């Protein structure tokens, strides 16, 4: 299995520019589920990662709403601090937030766990909506 490296950059709150690398992390498999990622500094000086996760395929119009309807956001809550639907994207996309971990192995493991749970939830959703085309 090929691995992909993602880089988490710190986003400047005032300019919106990514200006400092916080770390590089190896992700093995399902990296296509990550749309983008960056970090923001919180008021207490710690960092929060903002990651947009999406689907592994282009979806049809009817599937877009169906996926949002059937996706259980609570599945990821043990690993993240928040999740929001991003309705202005081409495919269903969720913006998730979680605390930055200043240990490479722990951060790689945390990201991998999030992606694995997200993939399992998507598979469950795809099964659940397979015969729902006429409902949408």
Image (spheres, rainbow, N blue to C red):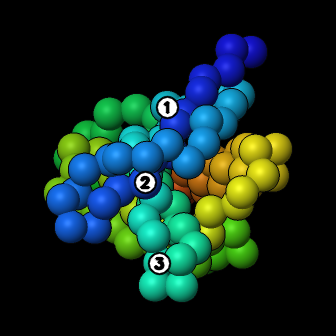
Instruction: Compute the Cα span from label 1 to label 3.
Output: 28 Å
Residue 32, numbered circle:
1
State the quadrant of the C terminus.
Answer: bottom left
Q: Look at the numbered disc 1 and give the secondary structure of its residue.
A: helix
Q: Disc count in the image? A: 3
Q: Nearer the viewer, residue 30 or 51?
A: 51
Sort mark 1 into few (<14), some (14-19) or many (20+) by Cα contacts within 10 Å: some
Task: Measure the C-alpha gap from mark 2 to mark 3.
Answer: 11 Å
Mark 1 vs mark 3: in front: 3
Marks 1 and 2 in Cβ contact (< 8 Å): no
* Residue 57 in the image: above or below residue 109: above
| Distance between mark 1 and mark 2 Cα atoms | 22 Å
- Does 113 sit above or below residue 6? below
Answer yes or no: is residue 121 visible.
Answer: yes
Discs 1/2, front: 2
103 over 73 or under it: above or below? above
Image disc number at residue 42? 3
Q: Which image quarter is the N terminus in? A: top right
Query: 27 or 84, which lies in front?
Result: 27
Label 3's element?
loop
| Residue bearing mark 2 | 10
User: Is residue 67 visible in the rendered structure shown here?
Assistant: no
Q: Earlier in the sequence, mark 2 or mark 3?
A: 2
The image shows residue 21 at horizontal and vertical percentages of: 49, 43
- Residues packed near mark 3 inside 10 Å, few (<14), some (14 to 19) or many (20 plus): few
Left or right: residue 5 compared with residue 65: right
């Amino acid at each position: 299995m090929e691995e992909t490296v993602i880089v988490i950059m710190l986003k400047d709150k005032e300019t919106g520019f990514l200006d400092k690398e916080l770390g590089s992390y190896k992700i093995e498999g399902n990296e296509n589920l990550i749309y983008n990622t960056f970090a923001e500094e919180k008021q207490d000086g710690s960092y929060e990662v903002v990651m947009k996760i999406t689907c592994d395929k282009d979806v049809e119009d009817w599937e877009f709403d169906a996926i949002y309807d059937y996706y259980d956001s609570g599945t990821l809550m043990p690993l993240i601090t928040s999740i929001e639907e991003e309705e202005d994207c081409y495919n269903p996309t969720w913006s998730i937030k979680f605390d930055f971990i200043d240990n490479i192995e722990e951060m790689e493991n945390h990201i991998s766990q999030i992606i694995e749970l997200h993939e399992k939830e998507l598979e469950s959703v795809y099964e659940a909506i397979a015969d729902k085309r006429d409902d949408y």
